[in-house]
Amino acid sequence: MTDQDDWDAVVIGSGIGGLVCAGYLAAAGRRVLVVEQHDVAGGNTHVFRRRRSYEFDVGVHYLGDCGPDGMLPAILGGLGLRDRIQFREMDQGGFDRISLPGLTVDVPAGWEPYRRRLTEALPQDAAGIEEFTGICQALAAELRAAQLSTEDLTPAELARRTPVTVRWGRRSLERLFEHCDLTPRARTVLAAQSPNYGLAPDLATVAIHSAVIDHYLRGAYYPVGGGQQLAAGLVEVLEAHGGELRTRCAAQRVLVEDGRVTGVLLADGQRVRTPLVVSNADYRRTVLELVGAEHFPQRLADRTREATMAHPFAILYLALDRPLHDRPNANLWWYRDADLEGWYQRLRRGELDTVDAMFVSFASLKEPDSGAVCPPGHSNFQVMTLCPPDPEWWGVERGPADGGRYRRGSAYLARKQQLTEAMLQAAEEALGPFRRNLTHVELATPLTQERYTRSSGGTPYGLAGWGKAGHRPDTRTTVEGLHVVGASTRHGSGIGGVATGGISCASEILGQPLLPLAHAGKLQVDPARLPERPADWDALAVSRGAARRTARGLAKLG
């Protein structure tokens, strides 16, 4: 690498949004460089290994809409990955189990089965549930039709075709609850999966909620081999088309002259020349640090500076030396009481002496035959709860992305131990005793997330508030040659949302309706160009990039 490094496009950050965009740009003949400050590509699709026995997924716990008509398989399929990345169905008769005191609801695939299951469980709220789910289903259908349209519609025509979205899309979920006259118990069941987007009902819009619920009601799946498969496949596409992934390579500054991108300054002092930058970095850090507020309209810079972030997770990674008996292949959403909105209020106040709500993902049930997840006869699962994002709550003055040290601080370690114990106690209430069988216990906090992804507040979900309710940035910016992708854009968070944002960004740059084309089965690449996979193929090694694929320090299994 030299000071004369020239590329058609540079993608900063290798989350799935950035890799999807990079893949489509490379497939179109652009020379694309992806720079990633971490050791491996993938963002929240990372996996990590412990004790040479367990592989844990950081953020991929389940995916929706991965059937034959699914959006994510279509996006991957357009890059020739349909046969390389496969998805295993969870229990479609109940992929999410919602557990409240005295009530258990197994969430099935399909809007009609979902509606029927809810009204049977909550007959006193049947009328309100019918109206609520009808609005959400109609809104989700409008959003999907708009995504797959190849027409260049005027705003007036788009509004005419999406009347439910116009009426309800930017209103809060709380407002829809009130409109449907739902009881607190029904609200808790309907919003039980809201930690999937990290927002309380008074902040989440009906559009966000509808899109996420529709995503999973189209079927719940898990990628065969774990989340790292997604990143590795996209890296293969990038490299097969002349692109390059550089890991352990941080971007320090996007260079802008006269309102247009001219290059990227790397943390080691090297300059990369390019007229096009796609930032998959945290949106606030992109605007305020990588590019600089002075290059944006004052109003946008102020809005970004004042933005709030969605709640982050604390995640407890657990392994047992015995199987999990008598459990369906379903996630668990467990609530100590039937007042979800009260729980969010306590969360905002930082009251986590007890864990009153949690999500449990059972990796060893989703991949029962995988030798990577855990040894035979063992179990691998994660317990998650939303928590405050403020570094002060964790006993530190500032987060690691801002230079703060935290890992050995006594206040941080004490808070971490307190929360670990509270989460273990809640998990045993929900699952029964298991501590004597523990072989691995490890808590990841929002500071852990921030250290690896540099996300503001350590959240995987991006912005909670950016100016007016429901407003989020588009992928195009006011700086010529600068685009953004990732969890904070209008396409939403989660793997499906950021992948959609990635292909939409590539569509804007290339001037082609890539998502409708991919969904219709059109390939942008020749799958024969992708490399053969040897018997010892390792998604984690591939995700380090060609230059570092065999470098020392890669954790192994077995």
Image (cartoon, rainbow, N blue to C red):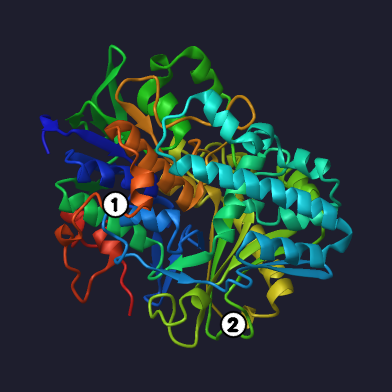
Q: Secondary structure at mark 2?
A: loop
Residue on which the image places disc 1: 522
Q: Position of residue 106 (x, y in %)?
A: 69, 70
- The kind of residue tagged 1 is Lys
- The kind of residue tagged 2 is Leu
Quarter of the figure with residue 151: top left
Q: Position of residue 235 (x, y in %)?
A: 26, 54
Q: Secondary structure at mark 1?
A: loop
Chain-order first, disc 1 or disc 2:
2
Q: Position of residue 404 (x, y in %)?
A: 48, 39
| Vertical order, 258 against 447 (above or below) | above
Question: Who is closer to the viewer here, 407 or 542?
Answer: 542
Q: What residue lies at 62% left-to-right and 41% top-to-bottom?
A: 207
| Vertical order, 418 against 283 (above or below) | below
Residue on which the image places disc 2: 324
Q: Is residue 394 visible?
A: no
Q: What residue lies at 84% left-to-right and 70% top-to-bottom?
A: 102
Q: Is residue 2 visible?
A: yes
Q: Is residue 142 left or right of residue 191?
A: left
Q: What residue lies at 38% left-to-right and 49% top-to-bottom?
A: 16
> Are the two marked residues, 1 and 2, in contact with CB atoms closer than 8 angstroms?
no
Q: Quadrant of the C terminus?
A: bottom left
Q: What residue lies at 81% left-to-right and 67% top-to-bottom?
A: 121
Number of other residues with Cα within 10 Å of mark 2, as a class: few under 14, some 14 to 19, many 20 or more: some
Q: Position of residue 216 (x, y in %)?
A: 57, 59
Question: What is the CA distance from the residue labelled 1 to the residue labelled 2?
Answer: 42 Å
Q: Is residue 333 left or right of residue 91?
A: right
